[in-house]
Every structure is written in structure tokens, then in C-alpha cells.
């Protein structure tokens, strides 16, 4: 009975398959580990992006790099990490506006030509207030405003990435 | 006989895959998949390793050759209609094409330069637009919530472990399924074809000196992202589709793929003549893809603004790569590469914040010229002789008031003694002590009505001069020139920088100013450009 070839085959498959699973399941669990996790932790509180004096009230948009003092990226921690860029302008002595330079279409960095914002990847164009100009490109919404305030003469900006290519503005 | 000539295509593809495997293994011996090291390790291979550019170039351009020859191979099989007998080989072949494109996408991002980084962001952005599971796909692909170390380790694993395993298995099955009688002349022809393809490849790689490498990935810097040339037809299709671009990006590959997969099922006729509609369909499809690809490049080449931005991007790339060769890439990543330039931090701050009022070339200079030799003996003597001269306080509001300092009228010897006293304040090591002490006597007689010389002490109506020109003095002055120890609030137009610049930055500026004292114009000119 112990020599039944079918039985042997089934047993071999069971043992082999079992062994395979024992190895594959933990490996798959590991590889899926980062999915949906905050693997790159970036600050959610306002970041210092420079002195407010650099902006004149009523002056044009100026591009600022948004730099996080501390970012944990997987197993490393780094200081002064560039998260992205924003355009800021001063509307009053103690008031400013900011737009994220991340194109709401697919996330390329937009540029400012003095009149309009332009995305170099798929040609979406935005007005001087950041609204999408219909018929120019695929962006479904205007540039994303970011919270910014002036405190002790410094511009403090909150960096947010929104979901791409949607008409509504939902945090990514 | 004439049909046999086409068989060399398959063997050329096998040869190219072997080239990819060998060059890939060599590159993997250098590559470091982390966001701080990836670009640096690729630049190291490309610019510093013997024949690194050649190996990397072969690896990159062989992929293009694979895409081209796969296309011709596919077209030839479709026209000949041999998929009717060997449908399974055809389908595996289509899977192989998908795997090749997977290699291209996963490989392009590994260089972590502007081109690969932004192209990947767009590609992942498109995939993230998939209904329902889009977010999951994105998170799975980039390894979490944001681009970083895990993005690279994942695409690296895909590129060097998962896809090679799949394509090896696929190629073996494909060859077995497509097997046919071979004779010796077949093998010889294949060998000649492989040699020819390889020769063209090497020639092209040498003419291009390897493969491009743009400036390091920078999330804050705009870049004209373009996909690799074999995805250009989709890029152009999105352009043409306008608001229906999402449909185009998702539907076009699905339609093309579906059509090719269905061919063996729908194209049944035995007689070649009856197959004309299908042949026309396949040829038409390839022609369309070809035309769209060309159209995309033509559109870009007509854009003058784009050309300007691309020229600038190329300049940035070659500059950064030159710096990487010269100074190495800092462990904090290639975006910090300029920190390797001597006094980079101070000089770039100086350029941005100080030159408007202090550069000899500035149109609206408001203060003294600061340049080579600033604060050395000759400068001090010249200042004492004519404090409101053009190079000194001449451009300030103070010079036009009664509070302006009067020229010091002394003989050459006494002037040199007084100069030595002031010069000694900087802590310079070459002070003539006897002169300095004589200078102190003159100072006490002629200057103390307004100035003081003790460290940290304000003058009665003018700056305290203790420590003048030393690093600490500069740091203090830059921080608050309006302090009573320095100019006093009534006498200075210079803004205070202690709120705006960190103490580290002010110290860096002070170091630069101290360096300027002993520098000649030639030294300044020899500094590496920022």
C-alpha cells in the first residue's frame, strides 16, 4: 500500500506545495508591507519657506522650494529635504497666498512665465490666479492652493499633496 | 528560402537579450538603489569607470533595438500569417513584448535623474487613474505614500529579478513553440545577422557616447518630461485626444493589444489572398503608430521655448556631472552636490543677498564696494584717507550728512601705524606689533572722541572698532549693523540679518569676508562658478 504510485505523487505534491507556501507567504507579506503605509514621513505642520520681506505687497508670484527640516524615508532620516515647490505672493502686510507647483493632472512641476502657469508635460495652462484655462490641456482643476501665513516676518506654508487627475481636491 | 531569411530576427532578439543580461549584471555590480545614491552610482559608471559609458550605453540602446526588431518580427509573422499554425507562440510573443516594455519602465526610473524621475511620476500617475484599484497600484509600485528609497528598491527588484525570470521562461517557451527544422545554413545566417545587429548597436552607442544622464531628480524643479521614444505614440495620442486623453491612454493600448491577441482567432482563411484585410489592418496599425511617433517628435522640434528649456536642462546636467567627478556626491544626495564647491553656501548667499548694495558692478549700490582685499592694509589706508570716497561710504546716505567721518590727515608713517592698529583688530597673524602700539597712541589722541577700540564697546558717536574685520565681528555686524556697537540705528541703511539668516549662514558669510581680505582679484576669478 505504501508503494501506491498515485499516493506517492499526491504526497510529494502536498509536501512540495506546503513548503512552497511556507516560503512564499512570508515573502509576499513582506513585499506587500509598504503598501498603504506612510513610508516617507513628511511634516504636516507649517514649514518655513523664507522671509516675508522678500515679497512685496501686491507683487508677482515667486517660486519657493518647500524644504522639510526632517524627513524619514524608509530606513533613513535626512535633514532639509526638498519636498517640492510652491508659488507665493503677498496680498497684504500680514497675508499671503500660495499655490502648489504640482500639476493637478499627473504631478509634473509647473513653471511661471510671468503671466500664466504652464505644465511642461502635457501643456495644461493656468491663469495668473491658478485657474485651469479650458481647452489648453488635460488638467481637470486649477492649481492647488496651500495654506500659508506670515508669522514673525516669516512665511509659513503647509505642504499638501492632493490626488491627481480629479476634478475635486482630495488629499492623497 | 526567402521566408527563412526572416528567421534571423528571432535569433537577433535572443542575442540582444543576452547583451542586456551581461551588461545588466555588470551595471548591477555598481548600482546603489537608494534615493541618495542611485544617481551618483549611475553617474559614476557613466563618467568615471573605464568603459562604463559603453556598457551602460549598450544596456540602454539594446532595449531600443529589441523594441524595433520585435516590431519587425511581429509584423513579419502577421503578414506571413504563420500565427494561424502556431497561435500559442504568437501569444507568448505578445507577452514578451509586454515584458520588454516593463523592463523599459522599471529601468528608466532607476537612474533617478530628472528624465527618469518625472517620466515615472507621469506613468505611475496614469496607472493611479485606474478605477477602484488605482491608489493600490500606485502604493504597491512606489512602495508606500511617496517617492523615496522604497520606490527604487521595488523597481530594481522588478528590473533585475522578477522580469528577467519571467522573460527567460517566456523566451524558452516561445522558442520551443515556434520550433522548426533548422539546417546548418540557417545557423550561419543567424550568426551573421547577430553580428550585423551587434555592430550597428556598438556603432550607435559609440556615436552617442553611451546613454543620456540628466541632472539628479529634483521634486522642486520643473522638467519637460517625455516618455522613452517607444511610448511617444501614446504621448502624442493623449495630446490629440484633448479631454478624452484618459480614455486614449487606457483604451488605445487595450485596443491594440486586444486586436493582436484576437488575430489568430479571427484570421482563419487558408489562402493568402483572402487574408488581405487582416494584413492591411496590422500594417495600418503599425503605420499609425509610426506616424504618431514621428508627429510627436516633429511637434517638439518646432517648439522654440522647449528647445531653450532643454538646452538649460542639458547645461545643468553636464555641470552637475562635472561636479560629481570633481568633488564626489555628498552622502546626503546629489541635490547637495554644490556644497562641494569651496565656500558655496556663503558665496551663493552673498550673491543673492549682498551684491545688490555691495558689488562694484551693481547699478544701485548703496554701500561700500566689497571685493578682493576688503579690509587689508591698503584698503584701510585708502578708507582713512577718504571715508566718503566712491568705493567706501560715497553711496550711503550717511556720507551726505554732517555725521559722516572726516578724512584722516596724517603723515604716511603715522597713517601706516594707525592702519596697523585697525588691521590688528582682525586677528591677522602678520601684525607688526611695534607699529600697532604706535598706532594705539595716535588712536587715543585723534579718534576716541567718536570711536572706541576695546572689544564690544561702542564709540561715543561712531562705531566701536574692537575686533574690526575678525570673523566674530563680521558675524555680529551682519546680524545687526544698527547695534550701538556698530553703526547705530541712525547711521546705517543696511538691514539686519539675524532674523533672516541662521547663525551658521552668518558665520559662513563672515568666513568668506575674512577670506576676501587676503584674496586678490585673481583668486576671486579662479573660484569655481556657482
Image (cartoon, rainbow, N blue to C red):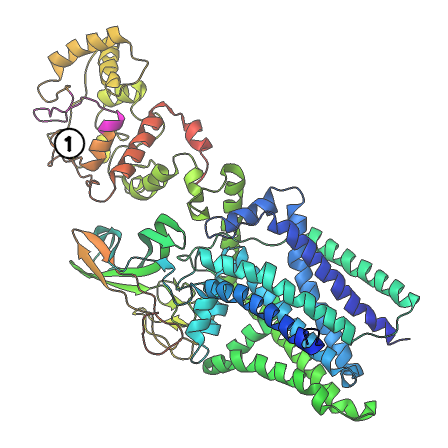
Label 1 marks a residue whose chain is B
Displayed quadrant of residue B482: top left
Q: Main secondary structure of the magenta part?
A: loop
Q: Is residue B106 above or below residue A165?
A: above
In what quadrant of the picture does the N terminus of chain B appear?
bottom right
- Residue B449 shown left or right of residue B370 in the figure: left
Between B395 and B167, the one lying in front of the other is B167
Magenta part of the chain:
B455-473
Residue under numbered circle 1: B487
Answer above or below: position of B510 versus B64: above
| Magenta region includes residue B467 | yes
Q: Residue at x 25, y 37 (%)?
A: B503
Q: Residues within 10 Å of mark 1 (few under 14, many from 20)?
A: many
| Observer-nearest of A141 and B521 | A141
- Residue A20 x, y percent position in the rendering: 57, 67
Front residue of this view, candidates B42 and B276: B42
Q: Can you give x and y, in whole percent of width and height, for residue B279 in the image?
A: 75, 86
Q: Residue, x 36% and y 67% (percent of image)?
A: A116
Residue A111 in magenta?
no
Asked if residue B350 is positioned above or below residue B155 in the image, the reply reads above
Amino acid at each position: 500500500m505504501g508503494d501506491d504510485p498515485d499516493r506517492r505523487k499526491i504526497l510529494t505534491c502536498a509536501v512540495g506545495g506546503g513548503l512552497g507556501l511556507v516560503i512564499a507567504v512570508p515573502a509576499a507579506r513582506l513585499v506587500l508591507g509598504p503598501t498603504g503605509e506612510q513610508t516617507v514621513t513628511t511634516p504636516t505642520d507649517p514649514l518655513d519657506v523664507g522671509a516675508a520681506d522678500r515679497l512685496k505687497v501686491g507683487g508677482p508670484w515667486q517660486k519657493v522650494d518647500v524644504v522639510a527640516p526632517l524627513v524619514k524615508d524608509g530606513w533613513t532620516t535626512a535633514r532639509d529635504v526638498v519636498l517640492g515647490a510652491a508659488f507665493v505672493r503677498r496680498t497684504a502686510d500680514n497675508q499671503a497666498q500660495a499655490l502648489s507647483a504640482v500639476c493637478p493632472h499627473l504631478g509634473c512641476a509647473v513653471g511661471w512665465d510671468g503671466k500664466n502657469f504652464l505644465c511642461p508635460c502635457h501643456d495644461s495652462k493656468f491663469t495668473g490666479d491658478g485657474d485651469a484655462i479650458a481647452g489648453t490641456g488635460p488638467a481637470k482643476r486649477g492649481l492647488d492652493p496651500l495654506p500659508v501665513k506670515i508669522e514673525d516676518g516669516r512665511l509659513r506654508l503647509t505642504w499638501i499633496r492632493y490626488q491627481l487627475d480629479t476634478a475635486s481636491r482630495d488629499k492623497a | 528560402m526567402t521566408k527563412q531569411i526572416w528567421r534571423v530576427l528571432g535569433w537577433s532578439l535572443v542575442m540582444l537579450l543576452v547583451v542586456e543580461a551581461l551588461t545588466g549584471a555588470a551595471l548591477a555590480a555598481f548600482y546603489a538603489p537608494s534615493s541618495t545614491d542611485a544617481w551618483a552610482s549611475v553617474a559614476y559608471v557613466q563618467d568615471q569607470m573605464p568603459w562604463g559609458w559603453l556598457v551602460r550605453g549598450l544596456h540602454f540602446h539594446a532595449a531600443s533595438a529589441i523594441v524595433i526588431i520585435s516590431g519587425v518580427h511581429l509584423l513579419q509573422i502577421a503578414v506571413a500569417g504563420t500565427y494561424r499554425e502556431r497561435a500559442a507562440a504568437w501569444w507568448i510573443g505578445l507577452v514578451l513584448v509586454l515584458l520588454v516594455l516593463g523592463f523599459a519602465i522599471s529601468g528608466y526610473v532607476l537612474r533617478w535623474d530628472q528624465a527618469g524621475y518625472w517620466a515615472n511620476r507621469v506613468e505611475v500617475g496614469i496607472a493611479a487613474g485606474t478605477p477602484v484599484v488605482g491608489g493600490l497600484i500606485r502604493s504597491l509600485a512606489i512602495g508606500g505614500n511617496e517617492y523615496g528609497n522604497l520606490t527604487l528598491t521595488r523597481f530594481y527588484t522588478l528590473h533585475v529579478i522578477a522580469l528577467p525570470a519571467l522573460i527567460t521562461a517566456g523566451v524558452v517557451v516561445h522558442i520551443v513553440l515556434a520550433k522548426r527544422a533548422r539546417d546548418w545554413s540557417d545557423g550561419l545566417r543567424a550568426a551573421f545577422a547577430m553580428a550585423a545587429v551587434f555592430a550597428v548597436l556598438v556603432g550607435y552607442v559609440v556615436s552617442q557616447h553611451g546613454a543620456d544622464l540628466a541632472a539628479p531628480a529634483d521634486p522642486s524643479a520643473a522638467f519637460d518630461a517625455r516618455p522613452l521614444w517607444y511610448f511617444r505614440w501614446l504621448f502624442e495620442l493623449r495630446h490629440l485626444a484633448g479631454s478624452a486623453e484618459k480614455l486614449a491612454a487606457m483604451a488605445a493600448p487595450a485596443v491594440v493589444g486586444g486586436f493582436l491577441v484576437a488575430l489568430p482567432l479571427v484570421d482563419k482563411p487558408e489562402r493568402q489572398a483572402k487574408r488581405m484585410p487582416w494584413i492591411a489592418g496590422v500594417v495600418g496599425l503599425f503605420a499609425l503608430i509610426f506616424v504618431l511617433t514621428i508627429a510627436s517628435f516633429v511637434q517638439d522640434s518646432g517648439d522654440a521655448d522647449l528647445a531653450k528649456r532643454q538646452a538649460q536642462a542639458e547645461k545643468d546636467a553636464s555641470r552637475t556631472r562635472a561636479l560629481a567627478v570633481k568633488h564626489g556626491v555628498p552622502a546626503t544626495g546629489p541635490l547637495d552636490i554644490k556644497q562641494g564647491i569651496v565656500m558655496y553656501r556663503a558665496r551663493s548667499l552673498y550673491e543673492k543677498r549682498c551684491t545688490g548694495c555691495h558689488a562694484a558692478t551693481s547699478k544701485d549700490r548703496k554701500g561700500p564696494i566689497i571685493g578682493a582685499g576688503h579690509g587689508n592694509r591698503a584698503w584701510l589706508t585708502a578708507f582713512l584717507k577718504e571715508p566718503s570716497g566712491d568705493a567706501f561710504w560715497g553711496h550711503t546716505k550717511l556720507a551726505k550728512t554732517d555725521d559722516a567721518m572726516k578724512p584722516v590727515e596724517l603723515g604716511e608713517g603715522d597713517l601706516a601705524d594707525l592702519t596697523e592698529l585697525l588691521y590688528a583688530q582682525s586677528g591677522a597673524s602678520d601684525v607688526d606689533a611695534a607699529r600697532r602700539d604706535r598706532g594705539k597712541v595716535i588712536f587715543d589722541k585723534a579718534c576716541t572722541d567718536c570711536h572706541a577700540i576695546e572689544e564690544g564697546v561702542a564709540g561715543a558717536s561712531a562705531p566701536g572698532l574692537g575686533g574690526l574685520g575678525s570673523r566674530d565681528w563680521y558675524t555680529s555686524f551682519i546680524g545687526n549693523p544698527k547695534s550701538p556697537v556698530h553703526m547705530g540705528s541712525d547711521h546705517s541703511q543696511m538691514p539686519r540679518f539675524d532674523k533672516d539668516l541662521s547663525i551658521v549662514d552668518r558665520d559662513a558669510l563672515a568666513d568668506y569676508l575674512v577670506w576676501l581680505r587676503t584674496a586678490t582679484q585673481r583668486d576671486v576669478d579662479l573660484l569655481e562658478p556657482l
